[in-house]
Image (cartoon, grey):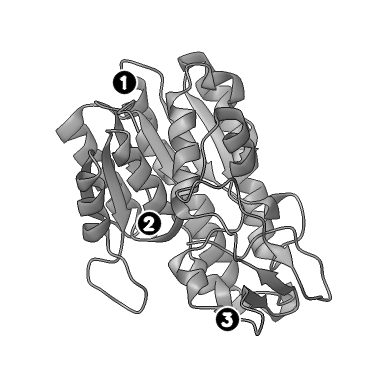
């Protein structure tokens, strides 16, 4: 891939693994300097650390800079962007991806009155408020860039239809509204804000929940929602290629305030997944008491 983003500075939140890692890798492959955040600095139950991801970003042609950051802590977020300002002087791309997917997993398909009240604070705190805070500190640096910047919020179809539980849907719907309203205020400065909806993504977390059927298919079972065939799920880097395409589009401001799926980005910009295929499709093979258009929570 040509280094279309050489000289550009990006921040990707929640990039130890999963979608965030895939985005960071593709930004690095396009030549960007990528600050990637996460809490994981030592190997744990799930593979991936911010240090490992940063090294992969650099190996792909970019510059990977790991920053340990707990997005529950506003002071740590402020310190992250202070570091970017001190070292780079500006910011071109912000990708808000951090999300408490492992915390959400035990709460899937549970009615709101069955959830602990902390579920609201956890899901909306990391995945909505954390994105708002990052935007607050990133905006002045985006305004310092020589060329108009881009904010990408990783959202979900759960914003538009029931998915997993009430707090998940509320958080994603609010995130898309935040995208729309921030776009109004940033448009005069030429800064684009877009919500991106990935499909089903084969992350490290998803891999822990999959099983192989007797006929050789790879599936994941979601309690109360059904069984999904994930054989053709998107890779995290497919999402990253969509983000790179947006960041490289000189007409991206026309999309500001809107929502776009990774499949739509693939069709518009003509990129494929790492294996050369188009966007994957998760086939629902089981049945549940409630329908859900949202993919299993990514992280």
Q: Residue at x 31, y 66 (%)?
A: 48
The Cα atoms of the two marked residues, 1 and 2, are separated by: 24 Å
Secondary structure of residue under mark 1: loop
Question: Looking at the image, which residue is at 31% across and 30% down?
Answer: 91
Instruction: Name the image quarter holding residue 81.
Output: top left
Please say if 141 is above or below 70: above
Image-based side of 292 in relation to 120, left or right: right
Query: Do the CB atoms of the residues marked 1 and 2 lie less than 8 Å apart?
Result: no
Closer to the eye: label 1 or 2:
1
Judging by the rendered image, the residue that carries numbered circle 2 is 71
Q: Which mark is residue 131?
A: none
Q: Which residue is mark 3?
A: 211
Q: Cα distance, mark 1 to mark 3?
A: 47 Å
Q: Residue 69 appears at what percent x and percent y?
A: 29, 57
Marker disc for residue 145: 1
Q: How many C-alpha atoms fall within 10 Å of the one at disc 3: few (<14), some, or many (≥20)?
A: some
**What is the secondary structure assignment of the residue under circle 2?**
loop
Between circles 3 and 2, the one closer to the viewer is 3
In this rendering, would 166 be left or right of 102? right
Q: Is residue 257 above or below residue 291?
A: above
Q: Is residue 158 above or below residue 7?
A: below
Q: Is residue 140 left or right of residue 272?
A: left
Q: Quadrant of the N terminus?
A: top left
The disc, 1 or 2, on the residue closer to the chain's N-terminal end is 2
Q: Nearer the viewer, residue 29 or 84?
A: 29
Residue 139, position as x, y percentages in the image: 39, 30
Visible in this render: residue 230?
A: yes
């Amino acid at each position: 891939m040509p280094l279309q983003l050489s000289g550009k500075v990006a921040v990707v939140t929640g990039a130890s693994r999963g979608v965030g890692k895939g985005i960071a890798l593709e930004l690095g492959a396009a030549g960007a300097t990528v600050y990637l955040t996460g809490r994981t600095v030592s190997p744990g139950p799930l593979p991936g650390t911010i240090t490992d991801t940063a090294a992969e970003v650099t190996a792909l042609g970019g510059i990977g800079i790991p920053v340990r950051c707990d997005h529950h802590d506003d002071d740590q977020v402020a310190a992250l962007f202070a570091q970017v300002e001190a070292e780079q002087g500006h910011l071109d791309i912000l990708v808000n991806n951090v999300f408490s997917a492992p915390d959400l997993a035990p709460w899937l398909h549970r009615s709101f009155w069955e959830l602990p009240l902390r579920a609201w604070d956890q899901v909306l705190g990391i995945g909505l408020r954390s994105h708002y805070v990052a935007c607050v500190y990133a905006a002045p640096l985006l305004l310092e860039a020589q060329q108009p910047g881009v904010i990408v919020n990783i959202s979900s179809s759960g914003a538009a239809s029931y998915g997993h539980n009430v707090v998940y849907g509320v958080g994603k719907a609010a995130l898309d509204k935040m995208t729309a309203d921030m776009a109004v205020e940033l448009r005069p400065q030429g800064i684009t804000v877009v919500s991106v909806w990935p499909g089903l993504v084969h992350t490290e977390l998803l891999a822990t929940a999959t099983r192989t059927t007797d006929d050789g298919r790879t599936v994941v079972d979601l309690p109360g929602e059904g069984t999904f065939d994930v054989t053709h799920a998107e890779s995290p880097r497919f999402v990253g290629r969509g983000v790179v395409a947006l960041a490289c589009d000189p007409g991206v401001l026309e999309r500001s305030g809107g929502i776009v799926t990774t499949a739509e980005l693939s069709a518009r910009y003509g990129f494929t997944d790492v294996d050369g295929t188009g966007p994957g499709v998760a086939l629902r093979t089981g049945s549940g008491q409630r329908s859900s258009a949202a993919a299993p929570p990514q992280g």
